[in-house]
Amino acid sequence: MLANMYLYLSSCALLFPFLCHVSMGTPVPQSENPAITECQNRVNLSRELVGNIRALLDNEDLFVGLNCSEQRVEVNPKTETVQACKPNTDMSACLRNISEDLRHYVVSLKAYKQAQTTLNSTVILTDKLLHSCITPDVETSIQLADSKLTSGNSVDQRVHLCKVLKGFYLRIITISRAIGYISAGDHKK
């Protein structure tokens, strides 16, 4: 009886990693179309960026002496990504808002000079995702850096960086979901 229980537990332990991987909600590409492959690359980039920004928010060195979790969230007020990327809406409006959001965060994070090496990987990933989302028929506006990240004393700048990163984290989750939805082809139904 005990041997059967050990056999059962060991087989469960062996199958657990496979079950966890299967339970992740990844879009299923519809074909081997290069555009679909590019969309899948966007999904992977957006997911990597979610983890990257979460790691930045958890970085104690970046926010030393500051409790970032107590700060407000500031998202880019010039876009409507959440509204534009709802199911059954215009995909070009969604991609335009995504591109404008990503451009805003690239420009703003580049402008914050105090932690360029820490923010560099986030800027690079955001820029990659931005360039993979731009399509010829999507026009975007020119984005200016967030002035609160470049003016005032260093403590105020770090507080504002915390707020901006929290907003970016929320927005990149939305963007990641929208990109997954688009890459799965569900926007065409």
Image: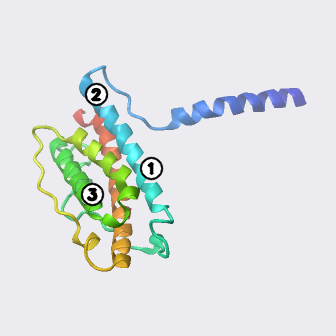
Q: Which amino acid type is shown beneath numbered disc 2?
A: Ile
Task: Identify which residue is drawn at 30% across, 60% down.
Answer: 109
Circle number at residue 105: 3
Relative vertical location of residue 44 with respect to residue 86 in this rendering, above or below: above
Quarter of the view holding residue 10: top right
| Pointer 1 residue | 51
Image location (x, y in percent) of residue 32: 30, 19
Asked whether residue 83 appears in the rendered view, the answer is no
Outermost residue toward the top? 32
Label 2 sits on a secondary structure element that is helix
Of residue 24 and residue 149, the one placed in the foreground of this image is 149
- Vertical comparison of 126 with 77: above or below: above
**Sequence order check, earlier mark of 3 and 1:** 1
Verify CB contact (< 8 Å) between mark 3 and mark 1.
no
Task: Tell me which numbered mark, 2 or 3, is placed earlier along the sequence.
Answer: 2
Q: Estimate how packed mark 1 is, as few (under 14), some (14 to 19) or many (20 or more) residues with alpha carbons within 10 Å.
A: some
Question: Which residue is at a point 22% across and 53% down the rendered structure image?
Answer: 103
Q: Label 3 sits on what residue type?
A: Tyr
